[in-house]
Image (tube, rainbow, N blue to C red):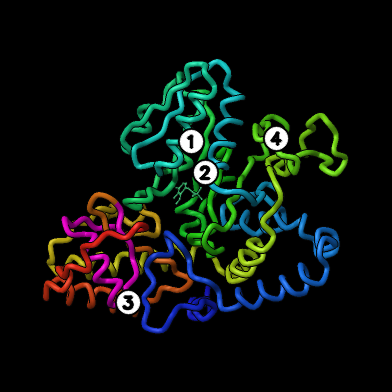
Amino acid sequence: MTDFTATRARFAIPEGVIYLDGNSLGPPTVDAAARVASMMTDEWGALLIRGWNEAGWMDAPALVGDRIARLIGAAPGSVTVGDTLSLRVWQALAAALDLMPERRVILTDDGNFPSDIYMAEGLARLKSQGHCVRIVAPEAVEDAIDDTVAVLMLTEVDYRTGRLHDMARLTAKAHAAGALTVWDLAHSAGAIAVNVGGAGADFAVGCTYKYLNGGPGAPAFSYLAPHMVGRARNPLQGWLGHAAPFAFAPDYAPAPGVAGMRIGTPPVIALEALATALDVWDGVDLQDLRARSIALSQAFIAGVEALDAGLTLAAPRMPEARGSQVSFRHPQAYAICRALIARGVIGDFRMPDVLRFGFAPLYVSPDDVARAVEILGEIMHSGAWDRPEFHARAAVT
Ligand SMILES: Cc1ncc(COP(=O)(O)O)c(C=O)c1O
């Protein structure tokens, strides 16, 4: 059994804060600051450029990738880490489209994160071959998969509502129609028991600053299915995806396997913070994680609905249809969110009227859920959310 009291003790969450925003930015681990400081002094400071060889910096993307692999049901050696998620989406999609020269449709849903759609549209425009991004409702995706689709590009867990796609079923349907799949795991890696291997996904990408707690702007990861090795080519042919970067050859020759999806210089300091955060996952059973996440989310939904405060559930009611996030709608969602934050309950707001609450089992406890519901009740029933300062919009919501 996973000891969630022990995992919680590994996070540095300020006193008095109930942190329900790990679906946006995870908190730091207790060890992160010291580990990063020592890396900077003992490795960067002491070794200077020798760190690339002597401290193994160049291998960090693969080593950290292997630790993420376990969390997404991927085989060792099939995940690399670096660069940002938007780039990784573009890269995976472009690699998939290259393998589908006869087809022109990128199928996605309107619950996908806008950056993924922007990236797909930009890529379609750049290709100038008549590609289009077909956007349907999440519930309509399955029926929209047909033999015109080149690539099914989806985010497994909807950033706004927490709705969870059935990766195995949709991947099988895409493959049966002759299409490839690109899955964005930003809201599922570390939130649920992702299984890219079991689902047969072709490409997957994700970020590490949400449920993996790597820190703001932490690097993204790419998964390349074993059946894609030797087939998929990296369209972003940066030198570190080259088989021999330090040969400085004029011609590009891809490194074998997922190493061929590397692009540029690894962000070594950020990888150290991420590696420290991944230590917490040692000993965490993903089935326990899922059970705890469902228990926390169900308790929250029941508590909020019992308040009878005009908040409408915007997430699927059935836990198996959700990730680890619960959303509610309210016309005054923004002000309520600000009022909650002022009382130490940190969730967030998404346009136009959505309040999001993430339940990261590594550090959110049943007591946190009970207290968050209590504070929400006080704010709603007293009208405390309706102060002018809670209505003023900040740049980042
Ligand atoms: C599902 C999803 N995809 C892509 C992105 C964009 O990631 P980045 O800003 O790291 O490029 C995000 C950011 O939150 C996201 O949630």
Q: Which mark is residue 187?
A: none
Query: Which is nearer the N-term, disc 4 or disc 3?
Result: 4
Residue that numbered label 4 is attached to: 237
Residue drawn at point x = 29 percent, y = 69 percent: 299
Which region shows up in magenta?
327-350
| Residue annotated with mark 3 | 344
- Mark 4 and mark 1 lie on one chain; the one further toward the N terminus is 1
Q: Position of residue 165 (x, y in %)?
A: 40, 44
Q: CA distance from mark 4 to mark 3?
A: 45 Å
What's the amino acid at mark 3?
A: Gly
Query: Per the image, is 62 magenta?
Result: no
The residue identified by callout 1 is 119
For mark 1, does the 10 Å Cα neighbourhood hold few (<14), some (14 to 19), or many (20 or more) residues?
some
The reply, left or right, for residue 137 in relation to residue 128 is left
Badge number at residue 86? 2
SS label for mark 2? helix
The numbered mark, 4 or 2, whose residue comes first in the sequence reads 2
Report if the CB atoms under discs 3 and 1 are less than 8 Å apart.
no
Mark 2 Cβ inside 8 Å of ligand 1: yes
Contact, mark 2 vs mark 1 (Cβ under 8 Å) = yes
